Amino acid sequence: MLFVPLAHLPYVTAYLTWFLVNAALLVSIPFLLRTRLKALGHAPLYLWLLACLGFFPIFIALIQGQDSILLLFLYCLTYASVGRRSEFSVGGWLALGLYKYHLVAPFVLPLWRRKRLIAAFLSVALSLGLISLAITGWQGLLDYPRYVWGSEHDAKYVLNSPPGLTANLRGLISAMVPAAHPEIRSCLLALFSAMVLLLMMYTAGRTLWADSGRRQAMLALNLVGTILISYHIFVHDLSLLFLAVVLVLELLLSDRPLPNATRTTLWVCIAILFFSPLYQVLSLRYRQLQLMAIVLVIFFLGLLSLVHSLHTRPDGPVSPGASAGR
């Protein structure tokens, strides 16, 4: 429905219109985040804009006219709503991102304890589902999963080849395990995806939302974990990492005591993620973008260490019971 108005325009006009919409969303992101970040909030606006455009996945999403910037914007609205403690809004914004359900559902699942959030998420999701049903009818709705699964495994769609441009666990495992053993690939993917998801759920269950630092670390962990266990992802989908990086940088620049090893790990991962030539070399020259998944795994482990450090600060650990508040 969002693209229906553009479908009535000439191709170049439609592209430029959507380009301007994406640019407007990018410009609005700093205004959503700056007031909620003590350290990074003092950075000039032009540095924020340069950081957005300097992040290769965002740049590619903007040039290609993708909808990943819209999803990033919805995640930023989600973070702003978390800061206002409006769990109903959090669930609503996340549900609006279900057009990329594989990049939203894993993020929401660890938050199952937040009952108002889940209620809002399911309500909006149900509404969107009914709209989809009205547009496509039952046959279209039932045919869609078969279409997606078929196109995902059709060799003529070159960009869908896992051992090449899929920077997640699926791409990494597919590149390491020979194609002659698909059952091993499936088992390893299910095992490691379950491990990542369980770690996300455990962390979310122990996080006290009243503590902004622990909450930021948990949200960043969920974002990185969601990308890792997503079944399908392109380089422009990695735009979501921008929010995770911003939240981590805010903690690294704060006066919170953190282990040196954790700080170093996170700084190195952020530096690699922002090194644009690496994306171009891995994707265009060698078609080995799945190697970026190694960086994401290390980033995920560094975030786990960060969360643990914040839970064991001198002011005392957080009891699991206290973090389960609604």
Image: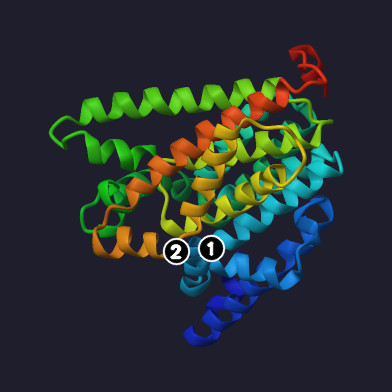
Q: Secondary structure at mark 2?
A: helix
> Which residue shows up at 61% across the image and 65% down it?
51
Q: Where is the N terminus found, in terms of image quarters?
A: bottom right
Q: Where residue 151 sits in the image (x, y, percent)?
A: 31, 52
Is tag 1's residue or tag 2's residue first in the polypeptide sequence? 1
Front-most of 296 and 44? 44
Q: Quadrant of residue 109?
A: top right
Residue 276 circle label? 2
Q: Secondary structure at mark 1?
A: loop
Q: Residue furthest left?
A: 180
Local crowd size for mark 1, using a 10 Å CA cut-off: few (<14), some (14–19), many (≥20): some
Total tally of numbered discs in the picture:
2
Q: Are marks 1 and 2 in contact (CB under 8 Å)?
A: yes
> Which residue shows up at 51% across the image and 69% down it?
59
Tell me if residue 2 can be seen: no
Q: Where residue 285 sits in the image (x, y, percent)?
A: 25, 64
Mark 1 — residue? 55
Local crowd size for mark 2, using a 10 Å CA cut-off: few (<14), some (14–19), many (≥20): some
Q: Is residue 277 left or right of residue 308?
A: left
Q: Is residue 54 left or right of residue 128?
A: left
Q: Is residue 294 above or below residue 132?
A: above
Looking at the rendered structure, the kind of residue marked 2 is Ser
